[in-house]
Image (cartoon, grey):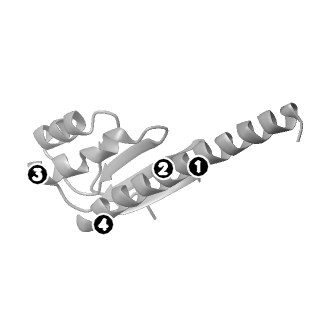
């Protein structure tokens, strides 16, 4: 092998390694997010995917307790994903404000009507 081939092979191998690790971390985060949402009776849907990111829509059928909201704060670490959370129930203005504060990097909305059909 020439020096140029060795350099190109090394660069290619490094790129593949970095892409593999990134893909694994990206998918693992999505699975953790979906598992938590499922625990609360919610559903997750998304468009697009790795490597550019997803537009993620999460629907929750009920208000969450403060402890549950803190667990859902994992959504703030979405990285390249845009996350929108819909509460399909009545929320007081205070509950909605608290949810928006805890989920500060997400779009948070409340609607008693179903939005994912």
Residue drawn 19% across the image and 53% down it: 90
Q: Earlier in the sequence, mark 4 or mark 2?
A: 2
Residue that label 4 marks: 38
User: For the residues marked 1 and 2, what is the alpha-carbon distance in whole angstroms?
Assistant: 7 Å
Residue drawn 24% across the image and 50% down it: 72
Quarter residue 44 falls in: bottom left
Image position, residue 47 (x, y; %): 56, 52
Image position, residue 26 (x, y; %): 48, 50
Could you say which is closer to the camera, residue 4 or residue 102? 4
Q: Nearer the viewer, mark 4 or mark 2?
A: 2
Image position, residue 51 (x, y; %): 60, 45
Q: Kindly check if marks 4 and 2 are in contact, taking CB atoms under 8 A apart as contact.
A: no
Q: Earlier in the sequence, mark 4 or mark 1?
A: 4
Residue that label 3 marks: 67
Is residue 51 at least partly visible in the picture?
no
User: For the residues marked 4 and 1, what is the alpha-carbon distance in whole angstroms?
Assistant: 22 Å
Residue drawn 61% across the image and 47% down it: 17
Residue that label 2 marks: 26
User: For the residues marked 4 and 2, what is the alpha-carbon distance in whole angstroms?
Assistant: 19 Å
Task: Answer few, some or many: residues within 10 Å of disc 3's Cα (few below 14, many 20 plus, some between 14 and 19).
Answer: few
Q: Secondary structure at mark 2?
A: helix
Count of marks, rendered view? 4
């Amino acid at each position: 092998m020439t020096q140029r081939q060795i350099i190109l092979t090394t660069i290619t191998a490094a790129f593949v390694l970095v892409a593999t690790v990134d893909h694994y971390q990206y998918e693992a985060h999505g699975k953790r997010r979906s598992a938590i949402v499922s625990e609360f009776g919610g559903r997750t849907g998304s468009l697009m995917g790795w490597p550019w990111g997803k537009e993620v829509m999460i629907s929750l059928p009920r208000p969450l307790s403060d402890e549950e909201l803190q667990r859902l704060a994992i959504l703030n670490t979405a990285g390249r994903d845009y996350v929108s959370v819909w509460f399909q129930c009545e929320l007081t203005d205070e509950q909605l404000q608290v949810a928006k504060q805890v989920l500060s990097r997400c779009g948070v909305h409340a609607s008693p009507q179903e939005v994912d059909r």
